[in-house]
Amino acid sequence: MNITEFGVLELLYHKGDQPIQQIGKKILIASSSITYVVDKLEKKKYVKRVACPDDRRVTFAAITEEGKAVMDEIFPKHQAMMTEIMSVIEADEKAQLIEQLKRLGLFAANYGVE
């Protein structure tokens, strides 16, 4: 599984079904790549497409039981690795970093980048 596939699967794992058209904005990849990534995840049986009952123009990506099982296995390892990587930053530095990233995210959202 590549990093982009992991990003899509992680989004669905934690946030639930997502409109395919919105995934790129949420994980910062080009919208032109989303269909390809969802196709690959669908072939692996980690994701399925679900039609929106309210709007025929919208299709959701939904994690499957197989996808959940994969994430149940690999996400704790990913989380542990990220915790280890971040351990070199002191608690006060982490607090500053969190605040800076929030400010940056708010600015980007107001600027039109989501």
Image (cartoon, rainbow, N blue to C red):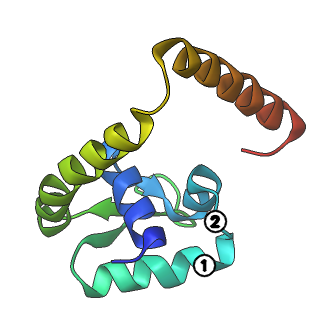
28 sits left or right of 63 in the view: right
- The residue lying toward the viewer, choosing from 73 and 90, is 90
What residue is shown with label 1? 33
If the image is split into quadrants, where does the C terminus sit?
Answer: top right
Image spot of residue 38 (x, y percent): 43, 76
Q: Looking at the figure, which quarter contains the N terminus?
A: bottom left
- Can you see residue 51? no
Circles 2 and 1 in contact, beta carbons < 8 Å: yes
Residue at the limit of the structure toward the top, as seen here: 92
Q: Secondary structure at mark 2?
A: loop
Above or below 1: residue 99: above
Question: Could you tell me which residue is drawn at 43 percent across and 36 percent down?
Answer: 86
Image side of residue 71 versus residue 54, left or right: left
Q: What residue is rendered at 38% in x and 65% in y?
A: 6
Image: 97 above or below 81: above
Q: What residue is shown at x 52% (from left), y 64% (from top)?
A: 20
- Picture quadrant where residue 100 is located: top right
Q: Is residue 48 above or below residue 62?
A: below
Residue closer to the observer: 57 or 80: 80
Find disc 2 in the rendering and name its residue. 29
* Residue 59 appears in the rendering: yes
Question: What is the three-letter code of the residue carrying label 2?
Answer: Ile
Residue at (33%, 46%) from the top-left corner?
16
